[in-house]
Amino acid sequence: MAQPQADDAVRTTNVYLLFAHEPYYPGDGAQEINTTVVAAASLLHPQVQQPDGARIHDRLTHGRTPGEIIPLSTLTHELDGGAGWPWVGDWEKVTTDLVHLVRTGECDALSLGLPEIGRALICAGPNNQVRAFDAAANEFITYGPKERAAVLAEVDMFLACLVAEQDLWPGDGLLPPLFHQA
């Protein structure tokens, strides 16, 4: 009988979801916000479509490293390139709900205005490449996993500064996480 791996049975509590979304401007003269980081527990907020949020939370928190930032595209990669999303949940509706929570102050977030290439790398899977044309040099430049890791490291640096005193508040009235029987 196969034994479950420890990573599969352990839920990591302080994990973060990173996702890109339609840009918005929070105020006059403010920088565009096009990417957001929330605490995984925000997926359990009652204003997030359920049970989709709880299912995504379950995928996001099992077998992770404490403090890890997981891009939505990494979950897509783990779900067989997105083929598994129908069994997990409607990620588009859930992320729209999360942006609404952030914008109305119902949870804390790290709101970012990533540059075009950085945002594209976060939206691409962990092993994918992004090609961009450099008109000045009249050539294509290819960005890959190394550059994606650098973007994630930069986001991690901003998040570490933000949560040094207090972790991101996921909101009030959270629903319980999914329970797995052993």
Image: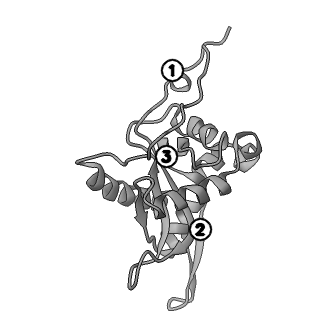
Pointer 1 or 2: first along the chain: 1
Name the residue tied to disc 2. 130
Q: Specify few, some or many for label 3: CA neighbours under 10 Å numbering under 14, 14-19, or 20 or more.
A: many
Q: Tell me which amino acid carries mark 2.
A: Val
Q: Kindly indicate the quadrant of the structure image that contains residue 56.
A: top right
Mark 1 or mark 3, whichever is nearer to me: 3
Residue pushed farthest left? 165
Q: CA distance from mark 1 to mark 3?
A: 25 Å
Name the residue tied to disc 3. 42
Determine the residue positioned at 40% across, 38% down: 14
Q: SS for tag 3?
A: helix
Looking at the image, residue 69 sits to the left or right of residue 49; the answer is left
For the residue pair 131 and 117, the one nearer the viewer reads as 117
Determine the residue positioned at 29% across, 55% down: 162
Whether residues under marks 3 and 2 lie with C-beta atoms below 8 angstroms apart, the answer is: no
For the residue pair 129 and 88, the one nearer the viewer reads as 88
Q: Tell me which amino acid carries mark 1.
A: Ala
Colour style of the rendered protein structure: one colour
Mark 1 or mark 2, whichever is nearer to me: 1
Pointer 1 or 3: first along the chain: 1
Residue pushed farthest top? 1
Numbered label attached to residue 6:
1
